[in-house]
Image (cartoon, coloured by chain):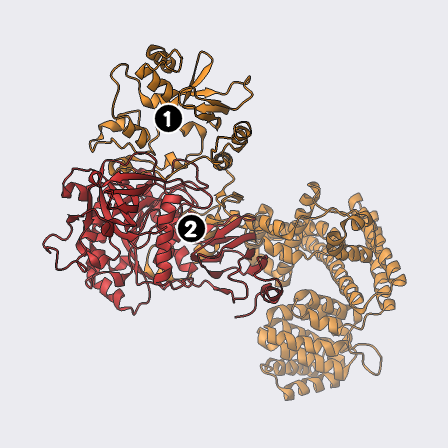
Chain colours: A orange, B red
Amino acid sequence: MDRDQEAIVKDFTSILDELTFNSRPIITTLTKMAEENISLAQYFVDALESRVEKCVPKQKLYAFYTIDSICKNAGSPYTIYFSRNLYNLYKKAYLLVDNQVRTKLINMFKTWIQPIESTGLPIFDNVELDKIENFLIKASALHHKNFTKLLPEPTVPLLLRDIDKLTTLTNERLTKQKNSDSNDEKEIEKLNMKILVLSQLKQELQKGKLTKVALKQVQVQLLQVFAQDQQVLQERIRQEQLQQEQLQQRQRTEQLQLQQLSHHQNAAINQQFQIKNDHNPLFGNSLNLNPQGFSTLFNNSNFIPMNQNMDDNNTMGGMNLNNIIEPANISNIEKQNKLNKMHSLFESLKAEKLVFQPKEQSIITLNAKLNIDDGKLINNSGRAKSETDLTRLPSIEFLSNIISDCKAYFSTVNIDIVNTPSLNISQDFILGENKIVENNLINTLYRAKPKKCTLCGKRFGNTLDERRLQSDHLDWHFRINKRIKGSENTLSNITATNSSSNTTQKNIQSRNWYLHDSQWIIFKDKEIVSTSRSDHSENNMTVVNLDFNTNMNSQKNNNINNADRNLSGNESNKFVKIDEGLLSKKYVIVPESVEDMSFKCPVCKEIVAATYDEELGEWIWKGCMEYKGKYFHATCYYESAKNKNTSIGLELDMEKLKNLITD
Amino acid sequence: MESLPGINDASSNQEVVNGDDEIHDLSLKKGDEWKIGVSSDNKLIVKIIHGIAEIFGTELANNKDYVFQNFKFSIFAVEDVELQWRCMELVGTNLSVQENITAKYIYNLHFALEKLRAASFDGPKIMIVGNSNTGKTSLTRTLCSYAIKYKTYQPLFVNLNPAEGIFTVPGAISATPVSDILDPQSSRWGQSMTSGATELHSKQPLVKNFGLEYIRENRELYKVVISQLAEVAMNRMQNDALVHRSGCIINTPPLEDLDDDLSELLVSFNQFKVNYIIYLGEETDENFSKIKKMFPESFLANILRIPKLSGIIPTDDIYKRSLQRSSIREYFYGTYNSVLSPYTIGVDFDDLTVWKPKNMIEDQENMEQSSPSKYTSVEINASNLQHSLVSLTYADRKENESAVQKAAILGYGLVTEVNEKRHKLRILLPVPGALPNKAMVLTSYRYLE
């Protein structure tokens, strides 16, 4: 390069440096210089590329405009030179600029893929443009629509060609894999599978009359497969480069060892991705799942520990890696992370046999089946089931319940209300927006205890204690409901045998008197809410003792009984002291030999019906006693014995009664 | 108001099927609340199909029929909710569904209280004040319900509004440890203890009788009764570690019912050793600044304000009366699901001693004004006692006035019939048995079955 040439290149770069705003004159000058000095094309390209790389993001667009202008006006050899690196250049710039500039970049790109009239081809190399296109499709869902619009109208031949291309690509990888020393059988199987799917898709396309929408979907999916495959290839190339670099670096100074280490890690990560990545496209397409949507679901909770390690690696080597790994790669890694997560989720679901794996069928027929599935299974379950042996999924509500429960668990698992400094009782806090309350604490009132009682809505947790509480609680409901319903069966039995008895069907109950202040003070609500059987002690504090003196002595008295009974018992008998409380507690278990569940008390002629006693688990005659094969109301027996009333022709003896009661 | 799914078909069907009782679907978005008023002549049946819905902080079980009658309340959707309802009264009306904008304040307050409970054995004692129709009872009920959800706390719910018969009859003030879930179907929050089985765990209230309808009729007596209630309640807290830790939540009468200087509030505040006052209403309210002036500078940070609750359905005197009637009926007869059997007995006039609180407004001329909190003796005749609610005290029949005044409350009876010729009357008692030989206090409440 002579001096003149050097001067021209210098001029070119200095003018280029002035391109800090969208200036048409500068761009035209540069274009003219490029046109006039085609021999220096290589230098100009270098200058422009470094300009795009180095200038602040805002100005990158203007440099691109210059490239665009030069290529469109001067054409070859600039187009060839720029094609070599266009994808990387474009990608890097795109990732750094804001959305407004991105749209401009996309608009510019749109002009690139229009074929030039003279040649009938786009200005740049097709492969490079395809790469950019794929990148853009993947880069933003926002621009997704624009690009599907941008794609040529999908026709069957066009798609078939795409499939062919993909098949050859996969075949290539297959042969490579077979030749390579790490002859991974699984890998080969996956690739074979993929080829099979592709050929099926091809057949389906050939025979099937598909709607445009369906074609479009196929097109987009194929593009995604392309993009993913290309990524794999790229990753492979990059890895090779890395390894080479590492070799060189190893011979260098010690100072670089740290950097080297991070390379190493990075390589390892890459390798991991690569392995996973190879089956991802197949999986992603055939099941039609959206990995991103799914993984955002678990984003907050981070419950796959592997993921955190990865992140650590990235940040640790962050500074050093930046030279080698571009931001784009980091976002790639993130994407891969999500895919990995998705994949391991899929694998674990598969291990639990929760995944329906269709037999080898083409994607399209399968998709059609899955779509009709919902409607048909419900309307016409019999027929639909015979057609497809699909296992029915649980309802969406059921599944979303599980997910919400999981979320609630993870949002509360590490929350300790005492150690939450932002939480305090103040005006600002109460009227403010509190993330900790909204996102975490609120769950403690609901789903953090995932088991909801179906009868009353009370919630129970998953710990051993809570489970025991829940089963006690359910037991309690059961007993209470039984008691509310009363012993209807036996009572109806009585009415059948004895029509004179008009006992009500339900157990009679009434409001209790309120406790005396001093009783209430020492009362514990545990006595009410306790659900375990053993706590229903005889010494029942929930009932008022009307003879209660304001002094607390009678509290100690074990026989606090129903108020009415104590009221009526004010004439205490002088002969034998028998506690009436004990009388009322007497009961007789209905003997199995008895056919009738009721008997007539010989003293008062009243029919006594059996009731079911939960504590005993037996049918009993309450407040009754047996004497010499006859049954009495205990109180009747007592009264009669007291009055020595032998007119009913029964032998009633106080002493015997006393024995009966005390035994 | 946008038309809701199911509403339109319902109203069109209604023309054809006369007075239908069919099932309607309704979906509530997360954060919405459905404000409902059901009269006493109608029944509303609600079934939650999917999602989390709650009424005053009590979560509803799914796929269970809840029956509502004579109740104004709102169903709050904690998550998106699908529900079914049927009610003749609501068919064809616009359902009032709107966003619950005050729910987050209640959550904030609840968790702030929860932290206090976790941090100390001496739980927070809060008093909720505000004008009428600002949501005092709703807030109290929601806070009580939330408090028992995550841990097994037992907050002491104190009702100082004698016009509301919660767990007891109107005319009484009460303190009740909330030890298990409240009944979302009940405007009385649930049942007090019975001798048998109730669907949910009953509560054991401490009851003190005020006996008059309006606080203004005897402010002195009201303050005395508050002090009596507070003394026992504080004693319980000292004895019951769990209640002590859970603290107490005090509901107060509307500020309009109180004296101009709000002295009743100050008595309650001192007697219950309140730590925090929650004012429901706006910053600019006259009463808010009045309350702030009542307390020293150092306490001002403990006076917190929450805007009037968005789920409030304004109530009128007719509704309040009907609730009072329901309370009295429920005390004796129970609910649809747990029917109680009260007991009527005949008594001779001579076997009764009846006292009554002084009504400082109505009986101004006849009364000596010196000791307003003292009871006066009541002559037993039809005009005084017919259909009236009387409280039975623990004090013996022959005890003097001051003993009766201080005595604990055994329960309530209802005089159903007074026969002056035969010198006899009939009393409905909640508990079977003879009439306890105790002194009675006449209340201003009348109930005709």
Disc number placed over residue B106 in the picture, else none = none
Marks 2/1 same chain: no
Is residue A635 found left or right of A135 in the rendered image? left
The reply to whether callout 2 and callout 1 are in contact (CB within 8 Å) is: no
Above or below, A12 relative to A530: below
Q: How many marks?
A: 2
Determine whether the residue tagged by mark 1 lies in a helix, strand or loop.
loop
Q: Tell me which residue sits at (36%, 53%) in the image.
A: B325
The residue at which mark 1 appears reads as A538
Query: For the view shown, which residue lies furthest in the front direction?
Result: B421
Disc number placed over residue B186 in the picture, else none = 2
Residue A206: x and y in percent read: 89, 62
Residue A545: x and y in percent read: 28, 31
- Mark 2 residue type: Ser
Q: What chain does badge 2 belong to? A: B
Q: Nearer the viewer, residue B282 or B65?
A: B65
